[in-house]
């Protein structure tokens, strides 16, 4: 038996259209030095290696090839090795 769908009521306030400039603007400052840029590339490389390594270890854990205690030790060692910025946000 099918029942009719209820109508949704819009309770959000109307959005005002602004009159501010919509000119294209750079998203990041152009004053980044080459040294800072190189560090960003290095950090990005470490993030990739950390994520790839941890994905492999997660699969090993899921398949029962390593224990959760071993995974915890491995995770700590990988964090020490790669020093990820974003990778630790998703660990747990």
Image (cartoon, rainbow, N blue to C red):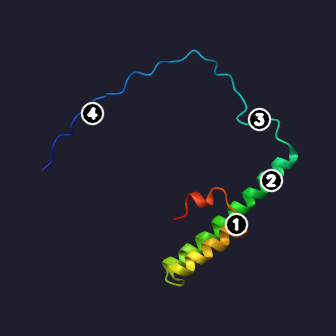
CB atoms at circles 3 and 2 under 8 Å apart?
A: no
Crowding near the residue tagged with mark 3, few <14, some 14–19, many ≥20 C-alpha atoms within 10 Å: few
**Which is nearer the N-term, disc 1 or disc 3?**
3
Q: Name the N-terminal-most of marks 2 and 1.
A: 2
Q: CA distance from mark 2 to mark 1?
A: 15 Å
The residues bearing labels 3 and 4 have C-alpha atoms spaced at a distance of 44 Å
Residue at the image position 55 percent from the left and 63 percent from the top:
91
Binning the other alpha carbons within 10 Å of mark 1 as few (below 14), some (14 to 19) or many (20 upward) gives some
Q: CA distance from mark 1 to mark 3?
A: 27 Å
Instruction: Name the element at disc 1.
Output: helix
Circle 1 sits on which residue?
49
Disc 2 vs disc 1: Cβ atoms closer than 8 Å? no
Farthest residue to the bottom: give it: 65
Say which residue label 4 marks.
8
**Circle 2 is placed at which residue position?**
39
Residue 57 as seen in the image, left or right of residue 47: left
Q: How crowded is the residue under tag 4: few (<14 C-alpha within 10 Å), some, or many (20+)?
A: few
Residue sticking out furthest to the left: 1
| Mark 2 nearby-residue class (10 Å; few <14, some 14–19, many ≥20) | few
Secondary element under disc 2, as helix, strand or loop, is helix
Observer-side mark, 3 or 4, equals 3
| Gap in angstroms between the C-alphas marked 3 and 2 | 16 Å
Badge 3 or badge 4: first in the primary sequence: 4
Q: Which residue is found at the position 62% from the left and 76% from the top?
A: 74
First in sequence: mark 4 vs mark 1: 4
Element carrying mark 4: loop
Residue denoted by label 3: 29
The picture places residue 84, in percent across and down from the top left corner, at 67, 61
Which residue appears at 73% of the width and 62% of the height?
Answer: 46
The Cα–Cα distance between marks 4 and 1, rounded to whole angstroms, is: 46 Å
Mark in the foreground, 2 or 4:
2
Q: Is residue 64 above or below residue 27?
A: below
């Amino acid at each position: 038996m099918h029942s009719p769908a209820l109508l949704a009521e819009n309770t959000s306030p109307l959005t005002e259209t602004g009159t501010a400039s919509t000119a294209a603007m750079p998203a990041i400052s152009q004053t980044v030095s080459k040294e800072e840029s190189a560090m960003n590339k290095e950090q990005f490389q470490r993030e990739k290696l950390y994520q790839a390594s941890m994905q492999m270890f997660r699969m090993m854990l899921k398949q029962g090839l390593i224990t959760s205690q071993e995974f915890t030790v491995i995770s700590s060692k990988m964090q020490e090795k790669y020093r990820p910025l974003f990778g630790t946000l998703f660990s747990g």
